[in-house]
Image (cartoon, rainbow, N blue to C red):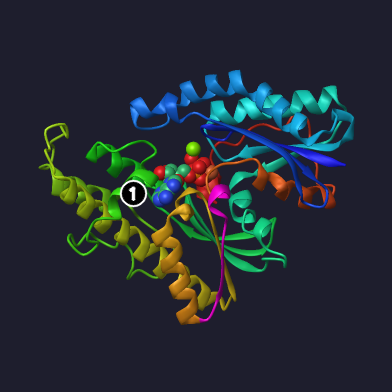
């Protein structure tokens, strides 16, 4: 017996069949990068339409790979919050339809909780309780996680998410989309100390983040205030590398400092990190160094489970165990209440 998990919160269409013991029996993922790269950002209408075209083949592939039949499934799970409205809707309608047609219960997944749960998939022991950090394209949030489904929001970004800042800086510099991997590739040959970009809110108590000032600081390094044309920059490869490295270091310094503080103030023993930005190798190394210095345990989601995927939907098994099913009239919830 197994569950089917469906993920369509942003621009990845994904499905997985996961055994009740947590083993991945089959998975499939269709990325939309090629549809959005021209715009250097995800276009919601384009994303929703692409999900419509891809969702059934993706589900079909995941089930075929598993060798199971629909009647072997115990439940249908779907990421229902948070995300782009049109994107979420496609996944939820598909899940509801299959739940009705195959007479299976429906499980609603919180996509951010799933990003943290991705750490569980690489760990033999329970990762809970822990401090959870989600660093992704739409969120930068710290949680006190008592269990996989029992999270207390500690703080988060008050403006841009960390991944969003990577994407916007990449766009200014004319680098590829998505910006995170492109900026980190360019940063590899740059000097992180060349530019002194701001580390916002480091000295404020609490666990909120702000990355919009950092983004603006990079912008002013490139063009004057009010100037919108980035096409005539004529930067050398080394200048681009130095800006990327200095920007990346500013993001990392803040993420590491706030995570450390969360661990210290809550006296937690473990930090678990998920979301697309957690794939960043320099961030992973900096978090590991902080963990070694401060003596806490660190779990970071495996790189392939940092960006959106349906495998982390295994968190639905926790809801299945509690028989926490969603009613068939459940709606999407694009925004969390105040980011929580
Ligand atoms: P959310 O999970 O908040 O709804 P999302 O699902 O769009 O947002 P993810 O798929 O988790 O976000 O992550 C995508 C983000 O991760 C993008 O902003 C991308 O630039 C960033 N990212 C991916 N790889 C890296 C990397 N190596 N370094 C920095 N950022 C990265
Ligand atoms: Mg994506
Ligand atoms: Fe995500």
Magenta-colored span: 295-305
Q: Quadrant of residue 38?
A: top left
Residue at image point 34% right, 27% down: 39
**Viewer-proximal residue among 324 and 18:** 18
**Viewer-proximal residue among 234 and 212:** 234
| Disc 1: CA contacts within 10 A as few (<14), some (14-19) or many (>=20) | some
In the picture provided, is 287 more to the left or to the right than 64? left
Secondary-structure class at tag 1: helix
Is residue 101 in the magenta section? no
Query: Could you say where residue 303 lies in the image, as x and y percent from the top left?
Result: 53, 52
In the picture provided, is 278 more to the left or to the right than 175? right
Query: Could you say where residue 29 lies in the image, as x and y percent from the top left?
Result: 60, 34
Q: Is residue 208 visible?
A: no
Q: Which residue is mark 1?
A: 185
Quadrant that contains the N terminus: top right
Q: Is residue 74 visible?
A: yes
**Viewer-proximal residue among 177 and 88:** 177
- Image position of 13 with respect to 322: above or below: above
Query: Could you say where residue 91 lies in the image, as x and y percent from the top left?
Result: 65, 29
**Viewer-proximal residue among 252 and 82:** 252
In the picture provided, is 150 more to the left or to the right than 203? right
Q: Quadrant of residue 28?
A: top right
- Image position of 334 with respect to 39: above or below: below
- Image position of 170 with respect to 208: above or below: above
């Amino acid at each position: 017996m197994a569950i089917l998990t469906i993920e369509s919160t942003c621009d990845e269409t994904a499905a997985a069949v996961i055994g009740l013991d947590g083993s991945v029996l089959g998975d499939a993922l269709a990325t939309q990068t090629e549809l959005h790269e021209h715009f250097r950002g995800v276009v919601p209408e384009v994303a929703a339409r692409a999900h419509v075209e891809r969702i059934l083949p993706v589900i079909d592939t995941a089930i075929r790979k598993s060798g199971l039949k629909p009647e072997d499934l115990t439940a249908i799970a779907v990421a229902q919050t948070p995300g782009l409205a049109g994107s979420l809707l496609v996944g939820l309608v598909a899940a509801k339809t299959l739940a009705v047609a195959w007479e299976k219960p429906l499980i609603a997944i919180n996509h951010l909780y799933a990003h943290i749960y991705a750490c569980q998939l690489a760990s033999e022991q329970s990762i809970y309780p822990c401090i959870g950090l989600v660093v992704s394209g739409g969120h930068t949030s710290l949680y006190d996680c008592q269990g996989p489904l029992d999270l207390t929001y500690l703080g988060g970004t008050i403006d841009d998410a960390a991944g969003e800042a990577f994407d916007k800086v990449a766009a200014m510099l004319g680098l590829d989309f998505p910006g995170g991997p492109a900026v980190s590739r360019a940063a590899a040959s740059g000097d992180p100390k060349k530019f002194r970009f701001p580390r916002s809110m480091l000295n404020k108590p609490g666990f909120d983040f702000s990355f919009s000032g950092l983004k603006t600081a990079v912008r002013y390094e490139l063009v004057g205030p009010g100037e919108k044309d980035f096409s005539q920059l004529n930067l050398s490869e080394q200048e681009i590398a130095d800006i990327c490295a200095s920007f990346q270091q500013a993001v990392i310094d803040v993420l590491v400092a706030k995570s450390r503080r969360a661990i210290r103030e809550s006296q937690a023993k473990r930090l678990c990190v998920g979301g697309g930005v957690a794939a960043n190798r320099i961030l992973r190394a900096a978090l590991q160094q902080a963990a070694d210095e401060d003596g806490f345990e660190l779990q970071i989601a495996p790189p392939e489970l940092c960006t959106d995927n349906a495998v982390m939907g295994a968190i639905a098994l926790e809801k299945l165990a509690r028989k926490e099913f969603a009613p068939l009239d459940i709606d999407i919830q694009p925004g969390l209440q105040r980011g929580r």
